[in-house]
Image (cartoon, grey):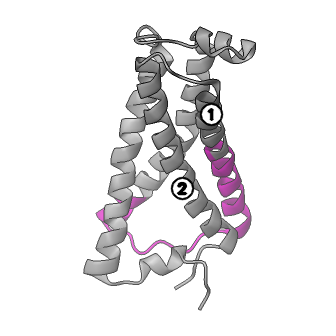
C-alpha cells in the first residue's frame, strides 16, 4: 500500500490537534462571552488556532499537488462517498476559519481587539444578530458530523474490511 508523504501525514495530524484546540477554545470563549468575562487572550488564541488550520489546509493542498496521493481503494459507491467526505472536509477547513474572521470583522469583537480592551468585547447575547457567527456555529456542527463520518470510515477500514487503509496515515514507512 502506498502511503501519503510524511509531510502530508504530519499536517493531517497537526490539523486535527489544532481543530480540537480551536473547538475547545471556542467553547470556552462562548461561555466566557455569555458570562461577560471574555478576554483578549481568549479571542487571540482561538483566532490563532483557526488561522493556523486555514494555513495548514492550504499547505496540505499544496503538498497534495506536489507529492500526489495514494490511489483510491476502489470505485464502489462507498468509495465515492469517502471522496465526497474528503472534499467536504477540505471545504469546511477553509470556510470555517473564514467565517470566524468575518464574525470578528462584523461584530463588536473588532472594537475590543483593536483597542486591546476586553470591556469592549461582545457580552452576553453579543452575537445575537451577527449572521456570520450563526454561519460559523452551523459550520462547526457540520464539521463535527463530517469528521465523525471520516473517523467511522477509517474504523470500518481498520476493523471490518481489514484492508490496511490506515497505514496511509502513519508516519513510518514500510
Tell me residue 98's x, y (percent): 60, 30
In the rendered image, residue 163, in percent from the top left (x then y), is placed at 37, 84
The secondary element bearing badge 2 is classed as helix
Q: Is residue 133 above or below residue 25?
A: above
Say which label, 1 or 2, has the lower sequence index: 2
How far apart are the two marked residues, 1 and 2, measured between alpha carbons?
15 Å
Q: Check if residue 88 falls in the magenta segment.
A: no
131 sits left or right of 52 in the view: left
Mark seen at residue 94:
none
User: Can you say which quadrant of the picture contains the C terminus?
Assistant: bottom right
Q: Helix, strand or loop at disc 1?
A: helix
Q: Residues within 10 Å of mark 2 (few under 14, many from 20)?
A: some
For residue 137, side relative to residue 96 (left or right): left
Given residues 121 and 20, the one toward you in this image is 121
Residue at the outermost left position:
160
Quarter of image, res 50: top right
- Identify the mark at residue 17; answer none if there is no mark: 2
Q: Which residue is mark 1?
A: 47
Query: Residue 139 is drawn in which quadrant?
Result: top left
Q: Is residue 118 visible?
A: yes
- Do the CB atoms of the residues marked 1 and 2 lie less than 8 Å apart? no
Q: Residue at x 61, y 46 (%)?
A: 53
Q: Residue at x 55, y 19 (%)?
A: 103
Q: Is residue 143 left or right of residue 78?
A: right
Which residue appears at 55% of the width and 27% of the height? 99
Q: Which residues are magenta?
A: 53-82
Q: Residue at x 48, y 12 (%)?
A: 123
The percent coordinates of residue 88 (x first, y second) are 45, 46
In this figure, what is the number of numbered marks? 2
Q: Is residue 134 above or below residue 68?
A: above
Q: Nearer the viewer, residue 12 or 4?
A: 12
Amino acid at each position: 500500500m502506498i502511503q501519503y508523504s510524511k509531510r502530508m501525514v504530519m499536517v493531517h495530524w497537526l490539523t486535527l490537534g489544532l481543530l480540537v484546540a480551536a473547538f475547545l477554545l471556542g467553547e470556552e470563549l462562548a461561555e466566557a462571552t455569555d458570562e461577560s468575562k471574555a478576554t483578549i487572550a481568549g479571542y487571540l488564541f482561538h483566532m490563532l488556532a483557526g488561522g493556523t488550520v486555514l494555513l495548514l489546509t492550504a499547505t496540505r493542498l499544496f503538498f497534495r499537488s506536489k507529492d500526489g496521493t495514494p490511489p483510491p481503494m476502489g470505485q464502489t459507491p462507498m468509495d465515492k462517498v469517502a471522496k465526497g467526505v474528503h472534499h467536504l472536509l477540505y471545504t469546511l477547513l477553509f470556510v470555517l476559519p473564514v467565517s470566524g474572521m468575518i464574525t470578528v470583522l462584523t461584530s463588536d469583537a473588532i472594537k475590543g481587539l483593536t483597542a486591546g480592551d476586553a470591556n469592549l468585547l461582545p457580552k452576553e447575547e453579543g452575537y445575537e444578530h451577527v449572521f456570520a457567527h450563526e454561519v460559523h456555529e452551523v459550520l462547526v456542527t457540520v464539521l463535527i458530523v463530517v469528521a465523525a463520518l471520516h473517523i467511522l470510515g477509517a474504523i470500518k477500514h481498520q476493523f471490518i474490511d481489514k484492508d490496511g487503509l490506515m497505514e496511509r496515515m502513519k508516519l513510518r514507512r514500510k
